[in-house]
Image (spheres, rainbow, N blue to C red):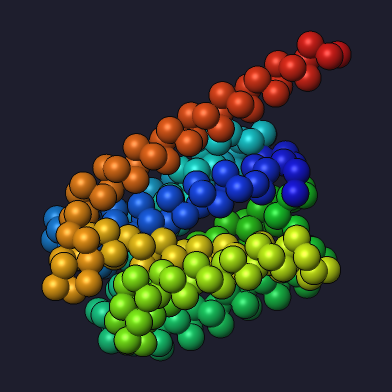
Amino acid sequence: MKESGKLPQITFTFWVMKICATTLGETAGDLLSMTLNAGYALSSIILLSFFFATLIIQLWSKKFHPVIYWAVILATSTAGTTLSDFMDRTLGLGYLGGSLILISILVLTLIVWKATENSLSVTNIKSLRAELFYWAAILFSNTLGTALGDFLADDSGLGFSGGAILIGSLLLIIVLAHYFTEISSVFLFWLAFVLTRPFGATFGDLLTKTRDKGGLNFGTKGSSLFLFAVLAILVYFSTSSGKKLSEAGKEKQ
């Protein structure tokens, strides 16, 4: 999949950055809602405000900007973390109940998007409406990922490491399907996009939770700072490589 307009290339680096951003979203969301005691409701309001602010900048942009794009991805991930926790814990829906509701919302979003735009392309979005569907699907998928990750880690009995191993195995199957089958690349993209969120959620819990709960006890602050640094470095190199390719293209002209 090539870069088109305001969207990045779907490469191995993209998925590394996606997992890093979603893991950071888990640790940063927990840092605000639990470590800093802001609570799920207030944290969701704060982080949704950040999401809408970054989304407006993204929609206003005329071309792909790595910093802006990944800021919106990070915003959907952090907001998705606290939104999911608010649904599952504060509203008492539970991890399974929250996951089922969010799966239904995500599927409905994709169905309406397909019916309206006649496409679910993630490389050739030409209209504002299609871009809004794109970001809505990303927000819902990242929110779903938190609920699904918590369900696998807590209610399924797999634990944090077991949940991460299961989802990692499923992601490997998707990669193999991409290279060795005729399954739609768009379908595989959305399947992988959904699964990388619970992978990040379980990996984030593995980093932050105490050892008696099956985690590595790095804490939300330390884990968030480390993951932010890694993501910032990747975004920097992504921006630098994009500028070099653009300059090379101009020289050829």
For image coordinates 35% across by 82% down, the residue present is 158
Q: Is residue 236 above or below residue 155?
A: above
Residue 68 rendering spot, x and y as whole percentages: 51, 38
Whether residue 103 appears in this view of the structure is yes
Q: Residue at x 56, y 82 (%)?
A: 104
Confirm whether residue 94 shows in the render: no
* Residue in view at x 18 percent, y 74 percent: 213
In the image, 9 versus 133, the foreground residue is: 9
Residue 134 appears at what percent x and percent y?
63, 58
The answer to which of 55 and 194 lies nearer the viewer is 194
The answer to whether residue 167 is above or below residue 73 is below
Q: Is residue 151 left or right of residue 238?
A: left
Q: In this picture, is 63 found above or below 39?
A: above
Q: Quadrant of residue 145?
A: bottom left
Residue 41 screen position, x and y as percent: 26, 67
Judge left or right: residue 63 versus residue 145.
right
Position of 17 compared to 220: left or right? right
Q: Classify residue 156 by image quadrant.
A: bottom left
How many marks the image carries: the answer is 0
For the C terminus, which image quadrant?
top right
Residue depicted at x 39% and y 39%? 230
Q: Reply above or below: 121 against 68.
A: below
